[in-house]
Amino acid sequence: MEPLEDWRSPKFEEELGRLDRGGISFEFLRRNEEYRDHYKSAAGESSADQQAVIAAREGLARRWGVLFPGRS
């Protein structure tokens, strides 16, 4: 996950103005501490048990209503 920028900066305001609904949603989520913790946990799941990895990612998607395109 990218580092957070100061949302009050003129640069950020300009970038935010170019975002679609999904982009704005992502910006909101990535600033949510609970989401960041859950994402780190799910992304860090590298168990040999592939079912555990899938379950961690599905739990993240269900809890936060997100999809990760390009992942099986």
Image (cartoon, rainbow, N blue to C red):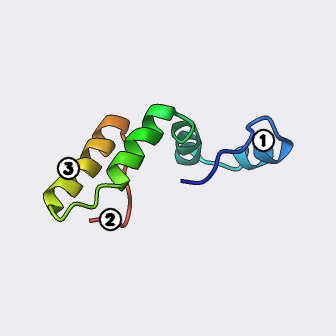
Residue 57 x, y percent position in the rendering? 28, 51
Tell me if 32 is positioned left or right of 57 in this view.
right
Residue that badge 1 annotates: 13
- Determine if residue 48 is in view: yes
Relative to 15, residue 29 above or below? above
Q: Nearer the viewer, mark 2 or mark 3?
A: 3
Residue type of the residue flagged with mark 2: Arg
User: Label 3 to label 1, Cα distance in Å?
Assistant: 36 Å
Tell me if 49 is positioned left or right of 12 in this view.
left
Tell me if 65 is positioned left or right of 27 in this view.
left
Identify the residue at horizontal 41%, vertical 48% (top origin): 40
Q: How many neighbours does mark 2 have within 10 angstroms: few (below 14), some (14-19), or many (20 or more)?
A: few
Residue that badge 2 annotates: 71
Identify the residue at horizontal 43%, vertical 39% (top origin): 37
User: Label 2 to label 3, Cα distance in Å?
Assistant: 13 Å
| Mark carried by residue 28 | none
- Mark 2 lies on a secondary structure that is loop
State the quadrant of the C terminus: bottom left
Residue that badge 3 annotates: 55
Q: Nearer the viewer, mark 3 or mark 1?
A: 3
Residue type of the residue flagged with mark 3: Ala
Residue type of the residue flagged with mark 1: Glu
- Tag 1 or tag 3, which sits nearer the N-term? 1
